[in-house]
Image (tube, helix red, strand yellow):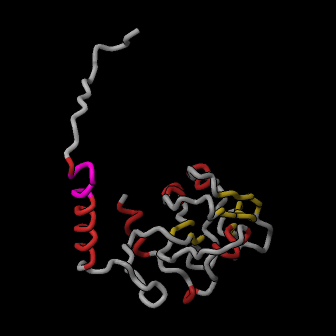
């Protein structure tokens, strides 16, 4: 039973001697190989030479603090919902009396984890955050051999309290506010 009226007629033509010996294909491949010998090298020696990244490069995540050193994250969960890879998990907790200098809202993330093996660095978490608490920096996430080291908790994500050790995200913030 024929489903459509479309058909293609295949003609089997006889190959010439040069085509049967594959000489044109081999010579064409050798020509391309020799042409690449005289081009500028595109590889870099990574540890010694660092590549220049664009201002909107998405690398290592950071949980930001405000000017007074309090965490911006309020554990709303919008970043976890927006994450297509489902790499972000968090547990919310209520702020106790005396913790006003640590957290700026009544609710905060007591546990905040990002599975970097699942993360696809799409940046949807920073777009979804209403408090501008999470950003992707220009730092490269290091590789490793153990899976345990790629679950980043608050110890690796939250920036230091000291203002001089904070992560500069001004380039990301400009790009984030344009959109």
Q: Residue at x 52, y 68 (%)?
A: 135
* Chief secondary structure of the magenta portion: helix
Quadrant where the N terminus sits is top left
Q: Position of residue 13 (x, y in %)?
A: 21, 34
Q: Is residue 130 left or right of residue 145?
A: left
Q: Position of residue 60 (x, y in %)?
A: 55, 72
Q: Residue at x 53, y 80 (%)?
A: 167
Q: Observer-nearest residue: 106 or 61? A: 61
Q: Position of residue 71 (x, y in %)?
A: 64, 71
Indicate the quadrant where residue 95 lies. Answer: bottom right
Residue at the extreme front? 17
108 is within the stretch colored magenta: no
Magenta-highlighted residues:
18-25
Q: Is residue 149 left or right of residue 168?
A: right
Quadrant where the C terminus sits is bottom left
Quick check: 84 above or below 152? above
């Amino acid at each position: 039973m024929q489903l459509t009226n479309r058909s293609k007629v295949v003609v089997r033509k006889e190959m010439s001697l040069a085509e049967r010996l594959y000489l044109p294909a081999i010579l064409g491949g050798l020509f391309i190989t020799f042409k690449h010998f005289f081009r500028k090298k595109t590889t870099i020696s990574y540890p010694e030479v660092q590549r220049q990244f664009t201002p909107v490069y998405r690398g290592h995540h950071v949980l930001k603090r405000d000017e007074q050193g309090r965490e911006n994250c309020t554990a709303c969960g919008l970043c976890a919902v927006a994450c297509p890879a489902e790499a972000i998990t968090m547990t919310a907790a209520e702020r106790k009396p005396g913790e006003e200098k640590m957290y700026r809202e009544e609710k905060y993330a007591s546990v905040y984890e990002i599975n970097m093996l699942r993360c696809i660095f799409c940046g949807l978490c920073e777009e979804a955050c209403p408090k501008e608490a999470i950003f992707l920096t220009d730092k490269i996430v290091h590789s490793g051999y153990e899976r345990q080291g790629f679950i980043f908790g608050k110890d690796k994500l939250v920036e230091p309290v000291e203002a001089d050790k904070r992560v500069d995200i001004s380039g990301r913030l400009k790009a984030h506010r344009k959109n």
